Structures are given as structure tokens and as C-alpha cells.
Image: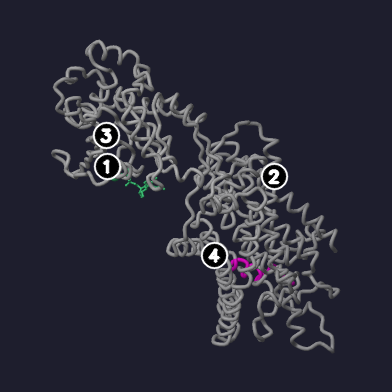
Amino acid sequence: MSKQLNVALIGNPNTGKTSVFNALTGLNQKVGNYPGITVDKKQGICKLSRGVKAHILDLPGTYSLNASSLDENVVIELLLNKNDKDYPDVAIIVSDVENLKRNLLLFTQIKDLKIPTILVINMSDLMTRKGISLDIELLEAKLHTKIALVSTRKNRGIDELKQLIENYKTISTQACLDTTTIDEAYFQSLQKAFPNQDVYKLWLVITQDANFGKINRQELDVSKFKTKSNQELKRLQQKEAIKRYQFINTILKEGQTIDRSKATDLRSKLDRLLIHKVWGYVIFFVILLTIFQAIYDWATVPMDLIDTTFASLAEWVKNTFPGGGMVTDLVAEGIVSGIGGIVIFIPQIAFLFLFISILEESGYMSRVVFLMDRVMRRFGLSGKSLVPLISGTACAIPAVMATRNIENWKERLITILVVPFTTCSARLPVYLIIIALVIPEGSIIGLNYQALVLMALYLLGFGMAILSAYILDRILKTKHKTFFVVEMPNYKLPLLKNVIITVIEKTKTFVFEAGKIILAISIILWVLASYGPGDKFNNAESYVETSATQSTFERDDQIAAFKLEHSYIGIVGKTIEPLIKPLGYDWKVGIGLVASFAAREVFVGTLATIYSVGSANEGENIDTIKTKMANETYADGTKVFTLASGISLLLFYAFAMQCMSTLAIVKRETKSWKWPILQLIGMTAIAYICALIAFQFLK
Ligand code: GDP
Ligand code: MG
């Protein structure tokens, strides 16, 4: 009877062990149980040449010889027990070509047990698709082994593998790692205690006992050698893994090249396009354009509906409780129009976050982060800064908090300082109303002018953030660069549920966080605008001159305007008028600006209140805010909101730091008042200068 050759198939789960097993054994298989546990034990016979028969054993998948599960324990028990009838004469480590690094950890461990070991690199059919190439000769030399490049799917390399099995005696049993380097003193004393044993084997037995309690191996009773606690053993195991990975990394650096640009699978193809040096940016730009276009077109219907609903609601309040009492006015003009000013932006905010969350869910956002890392690095930011900058389109507050995962302090600080430049949802209402006022309707090659301007404003905010980051990067002292690897998730269809939850959450945040402030300030402003000090406000009627040709409506209008001018808020607005005149704003806009320094979203509500108050006594329908603003003129009849003053105002809002809550959060995150104060002064100065230049140039 010829001697039977024992072959064990070992490898990480899903590397194709069973496939290799099937390829080697064909129909000569039987399935049983490992004694004592219900894990499949597959055995089969592989006929080699010259009548040699190999007994093949398909073992459960295992990641390493530091067992943590019963499945893995089966493999180690076998390899540690030379007396087991299945103890392998040769071990075949099945690895898959895509995860070679992880697979090789197990390979080096088994190799170090001095068992003749063959390395099967399976799934070689994927190599071209994944852009992987291997230097097999070099790998064989460095790993002291023989390699079979196999594809069970394409039935390649199996004959070569059989050859290697047959000639297993020629395979070197040289170890990969000098075990004693893990902890010299410990391993030397271990060797001294068991002079006839292999230290690595002893080490495995000891760690095995630590994990599973004493196991039945009379020849290797290590129970008397307990000089380290389980915790110390765990630490040494980690050290071992690190040393092995260092060994593997150096080898793979030479022996393996992965060139994703040569890969041809769908994911790689998509990646190559989406993070392409030119097309990547073009595609990102087109996607942004589409999103802003959609925000404009799709949101119009619900917005018009909300607009008219709140207009008729205010009218209904006035008609139902006539007499113009203070409470009626407060409700109709302060509260209803204040709430209307918040609710009207829900459709657009919801659409924006619908798109952002779809981009995130689909895996595309990670590509954008990767794409942007190239750009951001040059400006003292990290690719990770993109997430705060994009979250900044919702609100600077969560965005500032999102900088916490940027490891480098300088990059983080710069990100915090520039994030408020990105267009937050609070700016959106201001932008929308001013764009509607001063940018003509119409389109060029199917693109809506107003949508284009809105997108330009988003890009402008982003651009200013990047530019200031660049400047800050030069100015700020500390110099540390970090490198990071973006995890690229697989592409997948966004889950509707996740998308909807994000949209609802963000919209709720806007309505309740920003909305609270908007409503509160709307009411305060209504009060400030409805009351004033002194004789001029209280006896406005006697101050307004009457001419014979005037109708009562016109006279009422004039009185109302006169009153507003002399109300508390009018006084503030007038006081700052000389300062903002060069920017193209009158004192009413000034009032809006003053109110906005608490939070910019109140601008629209403020103007709504102010203009509603102005025509409160007419008894006619309450107009929409937009019409009122459009009709607003100076004393000489020229319009207040022109292209020049509109652009100037847009720029001011784009750049000014008008958010107390953001200042507060920056103070908290930087633990100093220095940075928020710098932010406030710097941003407001930039805003003023840009608005000034724009107005003087355009008027
Ligand atoms: P095991 O868990 O290690 O026993 O692996 P299996 O033999 O069950 O295979 C795991 C997966 O890899 C299965 O889906 C196989 O179809 C697949 N697979 C196995 N060999 C190859 C191969 O050569 N090429 C490719 N592309 N896939 C393979
Ligand atoms: Mg299997």
C-alpha cells in the first residue's frame, strides 16, 4: 500500500477553498462532522500521477491562528496535533487575489509552524478586471514557497497545483517571522522550558489555552508555564500581527501592483470616470447645475401655494376681527406673515436635502470627497473638509461640529473659520427673494437665469471659503500635514427610507431651529416698527401735509410711511443709513441688515413686516412681499431694488457673518473668543468691501 499523502486546504472564508477542493477531488468526496462539533468535515481523494493518492481535507474558513471561534479552533487543533491522523503533510493556503494582504497573515503563521505550505492565489480570472498584476517568482522567493495561480471558475492552474502537491518535499519550510522578536526575554525562557519544541508552536498552544481553556495535547503541556496574564498575551498577539503585516507589506510592495486605472469592472469604470481629473469635475458641476435647476422648477408650485395660502390667511384674520385692534394687527402682520416667511422655504430646502442625501446614499459623495481632496490640499484643507463645507449648505452649526473628524488641528481650525462662507439655508430665503426681484426671468440654452445666479452664489460662497482657507493657511503658524485614505463604498441604489429621514430631519431643523428665531424676531420687529418715541410718531397725521389732489389712500400710505420712519426701528435704520448708502441700501434695508446680525434669515421676515405695516390701513388685500419690495421707490421715484443694489445685497449676505449661534459654536469648538471675533470682523469687512465695489461698479 502506497503511503497516503495528507493535504489540508486552509484559508480565509470565501476565498474558494471549497471550489479548489471540488476541482481537486471531483466526485471522490465524503462529508462528515468534526468530532464533537457540527462543522462540516469534507474529505476527498485526489489522484496524482504514478498512483499517488492525496487525501484532501477542506477546513473551515479562518482568518488567523489566533482563534476566536470554534470554527477556527478546528484548524488550530489540527495543526497543533502531530498525532492527528489528518495532520497535513502539506498545507494549501487558498487566498483570493483581491485580498492578498489579509490572506497572507494566515499564510505566514502556518508557514512558521514549519509545515510545507503551498500558496494558491485563486480567482486569478479577476486580475485584469481589477487591474492587478503579480510578480509570482519574486513572491515565491520572498515567501519561501511555491505559488499556484488558480481560477476555479475558468478551470485554470489546477494541474499545476497537483504538480506542486506531488513535489511537496521540495518546498522550503523556512519560517517567515523570527518569533522571538515579538518578546525576546519571554520567548527565550519559553524555549528554555521546552528545549525540544518549536517556540512558535508553544506560543500558539499557550494562546490557545488562554482562549479556550486547556486542550488535550499531552506532548505539549504548557500549563506550568504561565508567566504572563491573558491580557499581556493578547497584547503580544497584536504585536505579532503587526510584525507579520510589516513583513507582508514590504513583500507586496514589490510583488504586487494594483493599477485601478487599468481595471475594467463596472465599479472601477465608474470610479475612473467620476474621479477623472477633468470629467470628474465636469460631472460634479453638471450634477450641481441640475440640482439647482430642479430646486427652482419643482419647488415653484408648492411655494406659490404656500404664498397665496398665507396671504389669504392674513386677510381672513383681518376681516374676521375687524377694527384694526393691536392684537389683530399683531396676528395678521407679525405672526402670520412671520410663519409664512418660514414655511415658504420648506419646499426648496427639502429638495436640496433630497438631492444631497441621494448623492450620499448612492456612494457618489465619497467620490466627490476624493475628487476634492486634490483641490483642497492646496488650500490648507483636507478632503474631509468637504463634508463640513457641504453640511454648511444646511447650517454652519452642525458643519462646525462635523469638523471634529479632521485629525489635524490646523486643517480643522481653517475649516471652522471658513465654513460660514458656504451658503447656509438661512441665506436661501434672502437670495431667493432678491433674485426674484432683480434678476429677470428667462433662460439661456434652457437654463433659467435665476437658477444660474443661485448656483453662482453657492459657488461664490464655496470659492470664498477656499480662498480664505488659502490665505489662512499662509498666515497661521502651525505646520502639519496629514494624509488620509477615503473609504470608497460600493455604489448602491439609495434607500428611499434613509433619504426621506434625512430630508425630514434637515427640514425640521430649519423650521424649528431657524424658524423659532425668525418668528421671535419677526414679532419683536413688528413691535419696534409699530411703536415709536415722541411726537412725530404719535401725531403723524398732523405732520403729513395734505394737498388737494391726494386721495385718502395715498394720504394713509404717506402717514404709515412717516410713522415707520419715526418708529424705533426706523430710527436705527436711519442711523446706519450713511454707512450703507454707498452699498445702495436705504434705511429700510438697513433695518433688515440690523435685524440680520442676530440671524440672517430674519431679513425677509423683517422686510415683510415693514412693508405690511406700511400699507396696513389701506384695507386692501395684503400683497406678497415680493410685489411690495418691487414697488418700493426712493423719494425721487427711482426703484430701491435695482440690479446694482440687488447684487450688492446678495454679496453682502454671501460674505457677512450674521449668525450669533455660529459664533457661539465656534467659541465652543475652538475654546477661545479669539477665533469667533476674528471671524465676525473679517467676514463683515469682506462683505462690506465686496458689496461696495459691486454697487459702485454696477450703478
Ligand atoms: P470557501 O468559503 O473558501 O469555501 O469559498 P467557496 O469555494 O465557497 O467560494 C466562495 C465564492 O467565490 C463563491 O461565490 C465562488 O463562486 C467564488 N469563486 C471561487 N473561485 C473563484 C474563481 O476562481 N473566480 C471567481 N471569480 N470566483 C470564484
Ligand atoms: Mg467552503
Amino acid on which disc 1 is placed: Thr
Q: Where 649 sits versus 246, above or below? A: below
**Which of disc 1 and disc 3 is earlier in sequence?**
3
Residue 586 is inside the magenta segment: no
Q: Give the foreground label among 4 and 3.
A: 3
Residue 468: give its label. Answer: 2
Residue 113: give its label. Answer: none
Q: Quadrant of the C terminus?
A: bottom right
Q: Report the span colored magenta.
A: 522-536
- Distance between the Cα atoms at labels 3 and 1? 13 Å
What is the x, y in percent for residue 247? 44, 25
Q: Within the image, what quadrant is residue 203 found in?
A: top left
Q: Where 633 sits versus 113, above or below? A: below
Q: Which secondary structure class fits the magenta region best?
A: helix
What is the x, y in percent for residue 432? 66, 67
**Which of disc 2 and disc 3 is earlier in sequence?**
3
- Residue of label 3: 8
Few, some or many residues within 10 Å of mark 1 (<14, 14–19, 20+): some
Residue 25: give its label. Answer: 1
C-beta proximity under 8 Å, tags 4 and 3: no
What is the x, y in percent for residue 300? 61, 75
